[in-house]
Image (cartoon, rainbow, N blue to C red):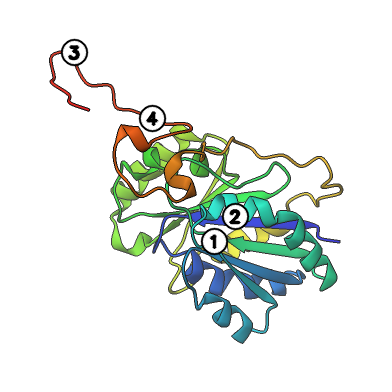
Amino acid sequence: MLHHVILFSGASAVGKTAALRHLLPLLTAEGATPCVCKIDCLQTQDDQLYRAMGLPCVAGLSGDLCPDHFLVSNLPELWHWGESLSCDTLVIETAGLCHRCSPATRQMTAGCVLDCTASSKAPEQLGPMLTEADFVVLTKIDMVSQAELEIICWQIRRLNPHAMLFPVDALAGYGLDLLAQWLRARPAITDRTEDTLRHTMPSGVCSYCVGEQRVGSAYQQGIIGKISFPEDTPCRL
């Protein structure tokens, strides 16, 4: 049975794959038998990297769908796949896009990967990916000052005071041993039948979701969001 499901989410190019490349061997050394799922949008070669490490890996490409919606729709199949391999740990690396939603469920161990060089305001732009996380991995710490790192950590703790913070150098692997030990100490999953999302997904039922390409209010149906302009601003529809 899968005892642990670990989610790695975060914006593009923040260092998710680089961190996992060092973390997965450390989890194995701690006694885990991991398998990996890589969720992306159009294409990925990361699954080849994980297989080259000797780990079972499946890649899911969401195509025209939101990758987070795509992942949640495939979770039961991923659980079954991991158990069919007699693995006790499923590690999911997903491609976060809009930052509005998070595919984390309550029984997962949910992580958010954050690039320290992005901005001290970056944590505020991540939404439930960060605010609902159990742990936050801070990458590229070698490229910022100690003061900048402390400001980012303060921002994260303000948004999510319960998450564990792990500053790491994902290229060198520095700091990931502490994360591996913490993950292995997490309580095991005993029953997934009542698992639920930690946060609602955004609505995705407008006319553009089903292939509409024409622009204009006459072609918009379903759930539509409109900007509220000041009353003295002329707005022609």
Which amino acid type is marked by label 4?
Answer: Gly
Q: Quadrant of residue 71?
A: bottom right
Expressed as whole percent of the image width and height from the top left, the position of residue 82 reads 77, 67
Helix, strand or loop at label 3? It is loop
Going 59% across and 60% down the picture, which residue do you hit?
178
Label placed on residue 70 = 2
Q: CA distance from mark 2 to mark 1?
A: 6 Å
How far apart, in angstroms, are the residues tagged by discs 2 and 3?
40 Å
Residue 160 % position (x, y)? 51, 35
The residue identified by callout 3 is: 231
Q: CA distance from mark 4 to mark 2?
A: 23 Å
Q: Quadrant of residue 169?
A: bottom left
Q: Which residue does the image show at 71% across and 63% down from the upper left?
A: 90
Q: Secondary structure at mark 4?
A: loop
Given contact means CB atoms under 8 Å apart, are the residues at marks 3 and 1 in contact?
Answer: no
Q: Residues within 10 Å of mark 3 (few under 14, many from 20)?
A: few
CA gap, disc 3 and disc 1:
41 Å
Number of other residues with Cα within 10 Å of mark 2, as a class: few under 14, some 14 to 19, many 20 or more: many
